[in-house]
Image (cartoon, helix red, strand yellow):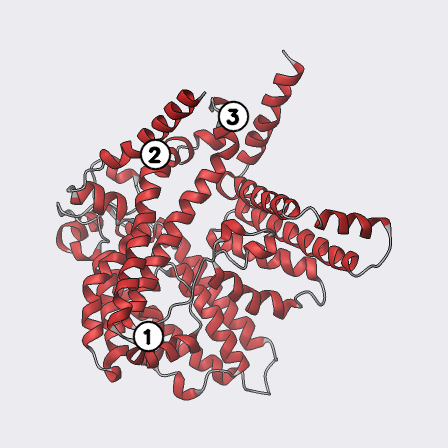
Amino acid sequence: MLAQFTNALARLAESLWRPVAETPWTDWRDFWAGRILDDRYVVCYFLPLLPLLLLLPRRHLRAGIVLSGLAFLAYVFGVFYAALWLGMCVGFYHLSERFAVEARRSDVIRWGPALAATLIVSGWYVGMMYVGALPLPAALSAWLYEHAQWAYPLGARPWRWEPFIAGRHPALERGQPPPLLFSIFWNPHNIGVAYLAVRMLHYFSELKRDTIPRARRGLLNFLAYLCYAPNLMQGPIERYDRFQEEIDACHAHRAWRNAPPALARIGWGLFKGLIATWYFMPLVERELFSQHYYKHPEQVESYAFLYFGVYIHIFWLYLEFSGYCDVSAGMARLLGYRQVENFNRPWLATSLRDLWRRWHISLSFLLRDYVYIPLGGSRRRHLLNLVVTFGLIGVWHALQFQLLVWGVLMGLMVAVNHYWSRWMKRLDETPAGRLAALRRAARRLHPLPTLCAWALTMHCFCHSLLVFFGGSGIWRVTWELIRRPAAALLGP
């Protein structure tokens, strides 16, 4: 028995060590640039610009943030997108100032300015989702690719040292230049557009509440808020007033003692990317991204992989996303800026309500404050408010029916969780009764009830993502999960 256990440990150690040993550490293009510093981790390309911000005095810091952010956008996403980003930010600034005036007027419909601002921001975001599908004439695409290469994003430019990180397009299979718009807008969540929309939801809401003084609303302040590169692409989503306060105080917070933990935080974020690449990405690419898992689960031989495949998918996403946030937080700490945390050990959550206080914290708290509570919160129409809020989270990721369904499903599950918690609280306050006695007996079994609550939470969250990632594939995967053990019990 001991020999078998030792052999199992040896095989496990070998399987864990093999990806590390086979890593081409000196291969910049295909490994580091092409596999690690891609997608969210392109934020690391801002690191060379960070010392320039450290050298700037306080009065020039915001201008430095704007210029360095635009330089980052120009290198990573192309000069065209950097100019477009600047134009969009200036446009939103003038729109917000007009909104601040209209929201104070008493001779207009009370909800008119807010509705108009919501429609404009929403319409803009929906339009940005589909810009990548707009066709350009082949001759124009060829000319741009030959004469305006800096307009293309990182990796779509025909230079040898850059990896290809933009979306795949049929033109590439035919050996033709990649369309400019598709190369940039293939995923609005990767280029900051989705997070700009949520930041505008926050900013316009605070203008409506009249909580941002006019002295704080200068164009430079506004541009610095939207052009701060470390969290520009995918958050965390800072509140406007907190961002300005941190920028004002960051010089006072700087100290040499901050450098080791800041660099360690950046290294920890990159290490998460390595873990995701070594152990999760091969499975995600081979079994999940190919839709083999969601479209043909009957072809998945391992029942364990069939059951935990969606866990692998979301944990890979968590490593990538939280690793990016770690890198961003490390950069901010070097600057003296205390960035809001976006994850707080979500895998320890013991309820769905607890999970959404730990997962993508800046987004979930912002939608709580500007959607859920204004709709009535838990005071009235609680179920509807939760469904609407989580439905918005779903369609914010993409305008797909499956994501709306996932949001509605998550809202319903959080509502059940809420009602269950309230019922348990009432039972705790009840001195007599069978249910109250059962409740007290269960609590004496600690930590078993907590472990059961944790397991139920993880199952509900992760298996709901079968809808998020696989759409209608949830029925195929669920049927296969039920069919196989049933066939083993009942026989042929």
Q: Where 127 falls versus 296 (above or below)?
A: below
Residue 184 visible within the image: no
Q: Regarding mark 3 in the picture, which secondary structure is present there?
A: helix
Q: Regarding mark 2 in the picture, which secondary structure is present there?
A: helix
Disc 1 residue type (three-letter): Leu
Q: Nearer the viewer, mark 3 or mark 1?
A: 3
Which residue was labeled with disc 1?
Answer: 223
Real-space Cα distance between discs 3 and 1? 51 Å
Q: Residue at x 35, y 58 (%)?
A: 326
Residue 456 marker: none
Q: Quadrant of residue 23?
A: top left
Q: Is 68 placed left or right of 365 in the picture? A: left
Real-space Cα distance between discs 1 and 2? 40 Å
Which residue was labeled with disc 3?
Answer: 303
Q: Is 415 in front, or is 403?
A: 415
Instruction: Tell which residue pokes out farthest to the right in this image.
Output: 433
Which residue was labeled with disc 2?
Answer: 282
Real-space Cα distance between discs 3 and 2? 18 Å
Dot 1: few (<14), some (14–19), or many (≥20) neighbours within 10 Å? many
Q: Is 211 in front, or is 153?
A: 211
Disc 3 residue type (three-letter): Tyr
